[in-house]
Each structure stands twice: as C-alpha cells, then as structure tokens.
Image (cartoon, rainbow, N blue to C red):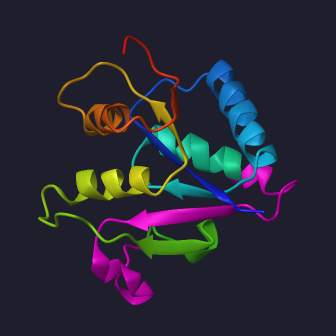
Amino acid sequence: MEYKTCSVFGHSTIEITKNLEDKLFETFENLIDSGYEYFYFGGFGMFDDVCWKIITELKQNYPHIKRIYCLSDPRHQNPLKRPRWMKDEDFEEFIYLDLAFDWWYQRIYFRNVEMINQSDFVIFYVNRTAKSGAYKTFQYAKKIKKPFINLGKDV
C-alpha cells in the first residue's frame, strides 16, 4: 500500500469550537482509513495545535500514523540547534524540505509551498485575509489544484 501525506495550515489565532474539533477528528479519521499515514505540521498557531492534538489522540488507535514537523530553518535538523519548544517526543520525525527560494523573511512561505507540493491533501482553516501567510498558502494550493478542504469562512 502506498501511503499518503496530508498537511495542515491555518491562521495563528482562531476560535476553537467543539464543532471544529469534531469535524477535524472525522476528517483525519477518514483520511487515515483511506491510507493517509504522514501528517505534516509547520507548528505555528492555534490551528496547527488543535490538529496536532487530534492526530496525537488518533495515534492511540492508529499507532502507524506519523506526526512530522517540517522545519523552516535547515540548522534545526541538528537536534542541539532546535528551539526548546521543538520536543522530540511530540513528533515522529523532523524534516527539512528543500526550498525553491531560501531568504529568511520568505522561508516560512516557501516551506509551506513545499509542504503542499509533497502532500496529497491539505486541510486549511483560512478566512479571507490578504496579508495572512495562511491565506497566501491557500491561494497557492488553489492555483496548483491541490485537493483540499477549508474549514474557515468567506473564501
């Protein structure tokens, strides 16, 4: 069986409701049942946090799934150079994806682009906010016709 990859992206500050958590749980469980094993995280904000929490909970019933942190700084491949909040026990893997462009200010966006390129499906929580990195990442996924679901509003 070929395993599939899912990435998650959302605004750093969102309202986390029971309805959102239930929808995410159902979506992740359906993806796992459809052969998704790798879940990519960028690790910034409340949406990533709630997705990580749900995937971690699902690992109890699906121990084969992997939480993978996609680094935005190549120096962090060395565990001794990672920020303290990046804990080995929180993820099965830390990876650095080769970026098409690597200038520090734009590094997160291009890391997100590469996460989308390497994913089979993307889960967004994005509202229409032109200055938002999550919104720009959403626009990229739409442009390349990547399969996705958006749990945000007005987009």
Indicate the position of residue 11 as horizontal and vertical percent values: 37, 34
Determine whether 80 is above or below 143 in the image. Answer: below
Q: Which residue lies furthest to the top in this view?
A: 154
Q: Nearer the viewer, residue 7 or 90?
A: 7
Horizontal side of residue 94 vs 130, given as left or right: right
Q: Number of numbered discs present?
A: 0
Q: Which of 56 and 28 is in front in this view?
A: 28
- Residue 139 sits in which quadrant? top left
Q: Does the magenta stretch include residue 72?
A: yes
Q: Which of 45 and 117 is in front in this view?
A: 117
Horizontal side of residue 121 vs 79, given as left or right: right
- Quadrant where the N terminus sits is bottom right
Horizontal side of residue 111 vs 21, given as left or right: left
- Residue 153 sits in which quadrant? top left
Q: Is residue 153 magenta?
A: no
Q: Residue at x 72, y 26 (%)?
A: 22
Indicate the position of residue 21 as horizontal and vertical percent values: 66, 29
Q: Residue furthest right?
A: 61
Indicate the position of residue 12 as horizontal and vertical percent values: 37, 38
Looking at the rendering, the stretch of residues picked out in magenta corresponds to 56-84
Horizontal side of residue 44 vs 31, given as left or right: left
Q: Residue at x 25, y 56 (%)?
A: 110
Indicate the position of residue 46 as horizontal and vertical percent values: 47, 39
- Quadrant where the C terminus sits is top left
Q: Which residue is drawn at 25% across and 35% down?
A: 136
